[in-house]
Structures are given as structure tokens and as C-alpha cells.
Image (cartoon, rainbow, N blue to C red):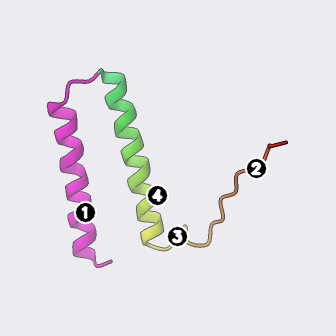
Amino acid sequence: MSLISLVVTLIVIGVLLWLVNSYIPMDVKIKNILNVVVVIFVVVWLLYTFGILDNVDIRIPHTGR
């Protein structure tokens, strides 16, 4: 992914988050949760994009029967 497309993607995500925060009426707690989820998603996506999390194997333990 080129640097220009990365910056454009981040700008689009930021504008969409700003539009949601500005024009959709929500409780402040829900807005804060939404903002945190979007920021965490973007950070993880950037880490995968730059190859930092490529070799990380995240396993969820099986607690079934």
C-alpha cells in the first residue's frame, strides 16, 4: 500500500468518525466506546499494514467439552 493511499484512508476514516460523532445523536458513553473501538481497529490495521503483526499468532484457548 502506498503512503498516499494510506493517508487518504486515514483521512476518510477520520472524516467518517467525525460525521458520526457530529450528526448522529448518541449518548456520550456510546460515542466514547465507538471512538475507542475505531482507534484500536485503525492501530491494529496499521500494525498489520507495516508488517509488525504479520508473524504474531493470536490463539484463543479452546474451553469446549
Instruction: Give the mark nearest the N terminus, 1 or 3.
Output: 1
Instruction: Give the mark nearest the N terminus, 3 or 2.
Output: 3
Residue to which mark 1 is pinned: 9
**Residue type, label 2:** Pro
Q: Position of residue 9 (x, y in %)?
A: 25, 63
- Residue 10 belongs to magenta span: yes
Please state the total of marks drawn on the protein image: 4
Instruction: Give the mark nearest the N terminus, 4 or 2.
Output: 4
**Residue type, label 1:** Thr
Q: Position of residue 39 (x, y in %)?
A: 38, 47
Q: CA distance from mark 4 to mark 1?
A: 14 Å
Q: CA distance from mark 2 to mark 1?
A: 34 Å
Q: Position of residue 51 (x, y in %)?
A: 49, 74
Q: Look at the image and give the residue range highlighted in magenta.
A: 1-26
Determine which of the numbered discs, if any, sits on residue 61 in the image: 2
**Element assignment for label 4:** helix
Q: CA distance from mark 4 to mark 2?
A: 21 Å
Measuring 70% from the left and 57% from the top, which residue is drawn there? 59
Residue to which mark 4 is pinned: 44
Tag 4 near tag 2, CB within 8 Å: no
Tag 2 near tag 1, CB within 8 Å: no
Instruction: Give the mark nearest the N terminus, 3 or 4.
Output: 4
Judge from the rendering whether residue 10 lies leftward or rightward of residue 58; answer left or right. Answer: left
Instruction: Give the mark nearest the N terminus, 4 or 1.
Output: 1
Vertical placement of residue 64 versus 42, above or below: above
Q: Nearer the viewer, mark 2 or mark 1?
A: 2
- Residue 17 belongs to magenta span: yes
Residue to which mark 3 is pinned: 52
Tag 3 near tag 4, CB within 8 Å: no
**Residue type, label 3:** Ile
Vertical placement of residue 34 versus 7, above or below: above
Measuring 55% from the left and 72% from the top, which residue is drawn there? 54
